[in-house]
Structures are given as structure tokens and as C-alpha cells.
Amino acid sequence: MKKGPGVRKSLVCGAAFAAACVSAVAVPVGAHATAPTPPTPSVPAVAPSGEPVTPGTGSPSTSSTSAPRGGTPGGSSGGPAGGQGAPDGEPDGTVTAQAVMVTPELPKFRTYAYGKAPLQRLDAYWRDAGPRATPRPAVLILHGGYWMGGDKGGGWKYFARRLTEQGFVVLSANYRLAPKAQWPAQRDDSLSALAFIKKHARLWNADPRRVAVLGSSAGGHLATQLGAFGTGGDQVRGVVALSPPNDPFLAFQDGADPAATLQQIKLRRAVTALVDCVPGSVTGVTGIAADCLKRLDDASTVTHASAGDAPMLLIHGSGDFVPVRQSTGLVSALRAAGVQATVKTVQGDLHAAQILEDERTFPMIVSWLKNHLKPRGQ
């Protein structure tokens, strides 16, 4: 039975219970290497018709503008390279993926408005296809940045080019940020970007029936939400998430530990900004207002896990400040519902896009995407 988006799924692991859901096995995949990322020139934002878009209007304009940049001043790109730290100037560990690689040939590139808000923009990367070419599978990228910063561009441009070399159409989206926009605005924007991609798939010779989502850190959380909210398998064919904080309440608890890192403390603050409430004590849910608890449960991907969700590949660093238990509980819930789900670890203090430094990560992701985005019946 298809689930309506407003109906909460059977509570497999609620916010306060998430810390106990750690039974799935994490599998190490290897070590890492480093090297540079080339720059990409700015281009105008355009409407589906191909005309430039004036930032903030969502409508065609005759004047060309630079592609909008998301986040806050001093914010991180949340991408594989070139970021400048988190919104408050502290490193957030989402900005360094570097490996010795040949620069791929540049694909076509345009920025589109999928909504009227300035941050409701996405970048499209695609390659020309012949008149009889088979539509290509598509990957939606969602950046990280504590739900409060980050951008669709930055180092993600190079990662997108690499994916187009592998035969994918790539769309990288911004979304409204906390604290100005509270949950579920970020999920709503991710769903809107996904709907825009499917509606206009022909522009890039993409197959609207073969779309996966890949997210990093906070964007990884949004990616798992797309794969589990409602009937996730009807929305996307697969989810790849790097260091996803799938249970914000668990992240809030970890940030109060006396041994918490600066990043974990900042993630705790980000949770309160995301749900616009203070979840209460770290020892339980006593004292949490009902509306706050409701938002926390809705923001936990585990509470949405059920049959019919999209298969998922979730990856953490062994020393990640978003620990692997943020994903093992979700994987256990998905497997219990009959959904294919895997969690892996990469050795090192790697977080989010830094995981791409591991020489085995990119081939693993590409292989997984190709396997799950094959035409039905193959």
C-alpha cells in the first residue's frame, strides 16, 4: 500500500531509541590519497526554456547573472574540495576530497531555478547524445553544511564531471537553510528539486524513471529522507549517503558528551536550529515539548523506514564525527522491512566528501549506482 507523505510510518526506531539501533555490520573499504581539483567558470542561471533566470524570481529574464551561490558568508561548500569552513568559520570536515586523476572533458552546464526562493537552484551537468541515444540515468547531489551552509557548486563540480564521464546526467541542488528555514523546508526543497528533474528530464536526455540521490553529511541525511519518506522507492531508485546524520536527536545527544569534538558540539547546535526547538536533556525525552518531539521524529529517517523504500549505500569514516551508528540503526530498520541496505566504513578521520579521498570509494559508488540504475528487467 502506498503511504501518503503526511502519514508517519510505523516507528521502528524513534528519536530517543536511535542510539540502541546499532546491530548492522560496518565493512572497512580502505585507505586514502590526495591531489588537486580544477576550477569551473560561472555561468548564467536559466529557466527550463534555457533563458537566464534573475536570482530570487524563478522566472526568465533577459539579463544574464552569475549562478547563485548558497550558504552563508564564510560557509563551506560542503563539497569534495575548495571549501572554507562551516558558517561560524570552524572547519566542518566536508571540503577536501582530492585524488590523483585526469581532468575529465567538460560537460554541458546550466543553472536552473526549481522554485522562487534564491536558494532553490540546481546545476545540471550533461553530455550531448545522438538523436537516437537512450536516455541516461540521473544522479541528484545534495550538499552538506550542518543544514545551515554549504553550496551545490565548489568541489562538487569536479565530482559531477567525473560522474558524467561514467554515463550519468548529474544535477546538484541547493536548498533553503536553517535557522531561517526550519524542518521540513530542507526535505521539501529536495523533493521539489527531484520533481523538477523528472519533469524536465528530456532537456538533458535523462531518464526520469532512473534517478538516484547522493548526499554528503547534512545532504546525506536529506538523501536518506528522499529514499524513505512516503514510498521512497517510487521517488528514487537508490540512495548513496556519505556521513549522514540520519537521527538528529542522536547527534544532539552526542554533542553533549564531555568528550564531544568541536564538530559534534556544532552539530548539536545545528539540530536545534533545524527543528527550531531544544530537544531537552541528554538522558531521555522527558521535558521535550510534543511539537518538538514530533519534528525530531519526522527528521529521523529511521522513523520512515518501511517496505517499498529505496535501496541505500551509507558510508562513514572510521573516525567520523558523525559516527557509523547514525547509519547502522537505519540499515537494520530497512533490512527488517525487506529493503536492501549496506553500511561501510573507510579507515581514517574522514567525514562526508573527505571519504572520496579513499581511492576505492569513487569506483564503489559508480558500480553501485550503475547496478541500481539499470533499466528494469536487466
Image: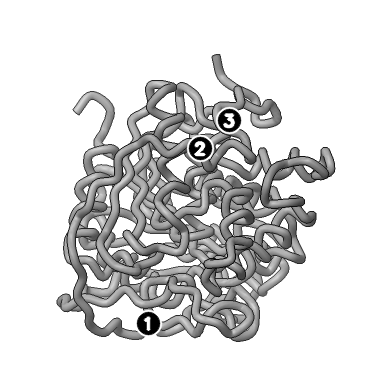
Q: Which residue is mark 2?
A: 20
Q: Which residue is mark 3?
A: 230
Where residue 213 appears, as percent x and y from the top left, is: 42, 48
Residue 129 appears in the picture as rendered: yes
Q: Which quarter shows the N terminus?
A: top right
Whole-number angstrom distance, CA of label 1 to CA of label 3: 37 Å
Q: Which mark is residue 248?
A: none
Residue 209 appears in the picture as rendered: no
Q: Earlier in the sequence, mark 1 or mark 3?
A: 1
Task: Give yes or no for contact between labels 1 and 3 (Cβ–Cβ under 8 Å).
Answer: no
Q: Mark 2: which secondary structure? A: helix
Whole-number angstrom distance, CA of label 2 to CA of label 1: 44 Å
Q: Which residue is mark 1?
A: 40
At 55% across and 27% down in the image, what residue appears? Answer: 12
Foreground label between 1 and 3: 3
**Disc 2 marks which amino acid?**
Ala
**Disc 3 marks which amino acid?**
Gly
Q: Earlier in the sequence, mark 3 or mark 2?
A: 2
Where residue 134 appears, as percent x and y from the top left, is: 25, 43
Whole-number angstrom distance, CA of label 3 to CA of label 2: 24 Å
At 31% across and 73% down in the image, what residue appears? Answer: 97
What colouring method underlies this structural image?
one colour
Where residue 26 appears, as percent x and y from the top left, is: 29, 45
Quadrant of the rendered structure where residue 62 is? bottom right
Vertical relation: 220 (above or below) 103: above
Task: Give yes or no for contact between labels 2 and 1 (Cβ–Cβ under 8 Å).
Answer: no
At 25% across and 66% down in the image, what residue appears? Answer: 162
Vertical relation: 377 (above or below) 280: above
Q: Residues within 10 Å of mark 2 (few under 14, many from 20)?
A: few
Q: Residues within 10 Å of mark 3 (few under 14, many from 20)?
A: many
**Disc 1 marks which amino acid?**
Thr
Q: Residues within 10 Å of mark 1 (few under 14, many from 20)?
A: few
